[in-house]
Amino acid sequence: MALQANFFERVYAVVRQIPEGRVTTYGAIARAIGAARSARMVGYAMNASHDDDTVPAHRVVNRNGLLTGKFHFDGTNLMQQLLENEGIKVVDNKIVNFKELLWEPTIQAGE
């Protein structure tokens, strides 16, 4: 259990760095913490983070820019609403201009 908690905390440390108005992916976070094949575990960490207001889980999407985690938020469209409040346009559960808005933590963590 301590190993999982440590993994989740490493994930949250990266997610807290995502700039407002930008998004990243489960896989990018996994690579940033040295666990490249653990994108699914990053998803589990995001699902477990909803009680922590310091973790902007809404900024984490799948590798295609889809809001695959939206069902884990309260309300049907809360994830989309949070993103749109930051100026991110979402159409059909997908980030518009995804490549331009993608934040790569391994490259940009110092932003």
Image: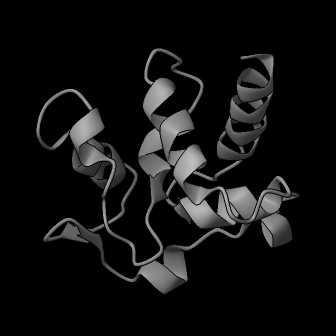
- In this view, 5 is above or below 94: above
Q: In this view, does 56 lie to the left or right of 5?
A: left
The quadrant in which residue 27 appears is bottom right
Quadrant placement of the N terminus = top right
Where residue 17 appears, as percent x and y from the top left, is 72, 46
Looking at the rendering, which quadrant does residue 104 occupy? Answer: bottom right
Measured as percent of width and height from the top left, residue 58 is found at 41, 45
Describe residue 103's horizontal placement relative to residue 3 as left or right: left
Number of labels in the image equals: 0
Quadrant placement of the C terminus: bottom right
Residue at 49% x, 25% y: name it.
48
Image: 20 above or below 99 = above
Query: Which residue is rendered at x = 31% and y = 78% of the image?
Result: 96
User: Closer to the camera, 73 or 18?
Assistant: 73
| Colour mapping | one colour
Looking at the picture, how far across and down is residue 73, in whole percent? Answer: 27, 33
* Image side of residue 61 versus residue 18, left or right: left
Compared with 74, 92 (above or below) is below
Answer with the quarter of the image where residue 109 lies: bottom right
Kindly tell me whether residue 91 is visible in this rendering: yes
Percent of width and height locating residue 110: 88, 58
Please tell me which residue is depicted at 53% across the width and 18% down the height of the picture: 52
Please give the name of the residue rendered at 64% of the width and 51% of the height, measured from the top-left corner.
Answer: 18
- Residue 56 in sight: no
Judge whether 91 appears above or below 57 on screen: below
